[in-house]
Amino acid sequence: MQRRGFLMTSLIGGFSTAAGAAHADAIHTGTNGITAGEQRIKVSDGEIPAYVASPQGKGPFPTVLVIEEIFGVHEYIRDVCRRLAHAGFMAVAPELYARLGDLSKMSDVQTILRDVISKAPDATVFDDLDHAATWAAAHGGSADRLGVIGFCRGGRDVWLYATHNPKLKAAVAYYGPVKTEDTAIQPHSPLDVADQLKCPLLGLYGGQDKMIDPADVQKAADKATAAGKRVEIVNYYMADHGFHADYRPTYNEAVAKNAWNRTLAWLRDHGVR
């Protein structure tokens, strides 16, 4: 596969510098009993790096696509994949921004937002995720038991991808913005298309999150519910944005554990497991 035009051909080592100094006590999940490591996934115009973790054995294992924050598939996202593998899932986290910038060398959040995130076409993100699901099904994952989770910007993409892929059984969005600027390459916000969800969606939000208006989240949920879709929104009133990210100062251990248990239950209760 040709790699011309891809600025990232391997994943970030360690934690992203753009997210600030990582906490020394950030969770590290080991690999005993699972298989985990970097893989390459063929996509429409080449190949992208991805982190994959799965239980040991033949499978097929229920598959969860993991959508990164704006910081790339760094150690936190990789650890999330390992946690899912220990829970019995194959987790696949493709580097969706590999074409647009080398996130391992970018330390300024505004630069990432301007030069990478805003230039990522939603259609390409969906296509890459579709290819990741296809890759998983050919490498020990299940084509029928498919879910998706994402964090921050990845939470937004969860909402949207859940309107795109009819094979999804369940979706979980961690503090994903539902009202974003519409552009030519990002033509819809989740609020625009919430009534088109193709699977049940769990939204996990922090009440102290200044970046997301809870009224907008509720509007999206109400729009979906009115269309006969299954959406559950959990608002942790004392939690901030990024409450699950154990390497960041906004981490809330009690809330993160509760949200993770809800995540696993949601996936299992809606056919991913």
Image: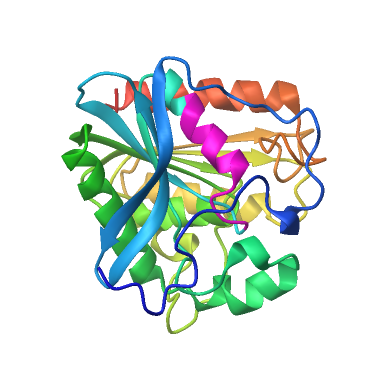
Q: Residue at x 26, y 47 (%)?
A: 133
Q: Is residue 42 above or below residue 248?
A: below
In percent of width and height, residue 37 lies at: 43, 38
Q: Quadrant of residue 9?
A: bottom left
Q: Is residue 90 left or right of residue 77?
A: left
Q: Nearer the viewer, residue 169 or 94?
A: 94
The residue furthest top is 33
Q: Is residue 225 left or right of residue 255?
A: left
Q: Is residue 34 above or below residue 200?
A: above
- Whether residue 154 appears in this view of the structure is yes
Q: Is residue 143 left or right of residue 130?
A: left
Q: Residue at x 68, y 47 (%)?
A: 15
Q: Quadrant of residue 34?
A: top left
* Residue 153 on the magenta span: no
For the magenta stretch, what is the residue range? 71-83
- Whether residue 164 appears in this view of the structure is no
In percent of width and height, residue 44 lies at: 24, 69
* Residue 79 on the magenta span: yes
Q: Is residue 217 above or below residue 109?
A: above
Location of the C terminus by quadrant is: top left
Majority SS type along the magenta span: helix
In percent of width and height, residue 26 lies at: 73, 31
Q: Residue at x 21, y 23 (%)?
A: 59
Colour basis: rainbow
In percent of width and height, residue 248 lies at: 77, 41
Location of the N terminus by quadrant is: bottom left
Q: Is residue 62 left or right of residue 70?
A: left
Count the marks.
0
Q: Is residue 271 above or below residue 114?
A: above
